[in-house]
Image (cartoon, helix red, strand yellow):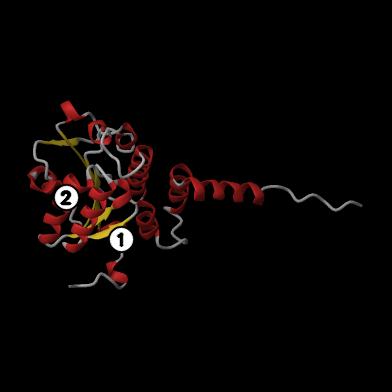
Amino acid sequence: MTFRNGLKSLLRPEDSVLVLIDHQPYQLTNVNSHDPHMAVNNATGLAKAAKAYAVPTILTSVLADRGGAIFPQITNVFPGQEVIDRMLINTWEDQKVVDAVKKTGRKQLVIAGLFTEICVAMPAIQAAGEGWDVTVITDACGGVSVEAHQVAIQRMIAAGCNMMTWMALACEWQRDYTKVGTLPALVEILKDHVAGSGMAYLWEQQLLNTPVPSAAG
């Protein structure tokens, strides 16, 4: 087994490509591994992070005429972008999606979608077997049960895939607080999608901008 460690194993925005799979209403109705609100929130935060770091993002759905359009919270991040609609359950068997990924020239393949155990696991396992450096963003996914989600994660790890959460990925793409070109965008994303840290940041800013009362004369 090859261990994933060392500086070069960390994800870099210039080497990453993101594929968002089947974040659709029909799928969401049977997500039971996560609160549905969090599934939408986390996928949206992930999409915004990809845009902030100029990471090419492929949007794909399955049977959209029956399963519904991808959540507007995601498509609004990429206005006018084509959503690749599929008949194949396994995204990595759809040549149009694979060609779109290959066209980016990136090798760090980042995947999130619904359901974890089906529409995420199959392409992740296949792509890893074909030599792609695959990372699955687990909290922007969701399964039909906690067990289904967790077993899928174990299966993908066994196949050589890397697991992360969306906030960890955003911070790994940022890596350096002196990268002022992207830091403001990261802060805005955290404010909107990471309630605890986002509100704490706003509170800190409030405190820093509150005048100190002058001492009584």
Q: Residues within 10 Å of mark 1 (few under 14, many from 20)?
A: some
Residue type at numbered disc 1 = Arg
Give how far across and how far down residue 95 sits, in percent.
7, 45
Give how far across and how far down residue 121 sits, in percent.
17, 51
Seen in the image, is 123 located left or right of residue 75? left
What residue is at 22 percent from the left and 28 percent from the top?
A: 68
Residue 36 sits in quarter? top left
What residue is at 27 percent from the left and 68 percent from the top?
A: 9
- Check residue 101 in the rendering and tell me which mark sits there, or answer none: 2
Mark yes or no: residue 63 visible: yes
Give how far across and how far down residue 84 sits, in percent.
16, 37
Q: Residues within 10 Å of mark 2 (few under 14, many from 20)?
A: many
8 to 52, vertically: above or below = below
User: In terms of sequence position, does the residue under pointer 2 or pointer 1 come before the other?
Assistant: 1
Give how far across and how far down residue 173 sits, in percent.
35, 58
Looking at the picture, tell me which residue is in the foreground, 167 or 178.
Answer: 167
Seen in the image, is 115 located left or right of residue 76? left
Residue type at numbered disc 2 = Val
Helix, strand, or loop for circle 1? Answer: loop
Residue 88 sits in quarter? top left
Looking at the picture, tell me which residue is in the foreground, 108 or 137.
Answer: 137
- Check residue 126 in the rendering and tell me which mark sits there, or answer none: none
Residue holding disc 1 = 12
160 to 75, vertically: above or below = below
Helix, strand, or loop for circle 2? Answer: helix
58 to 181, vertically: above or below = above
Mark yes or no: residue 107 visible: no
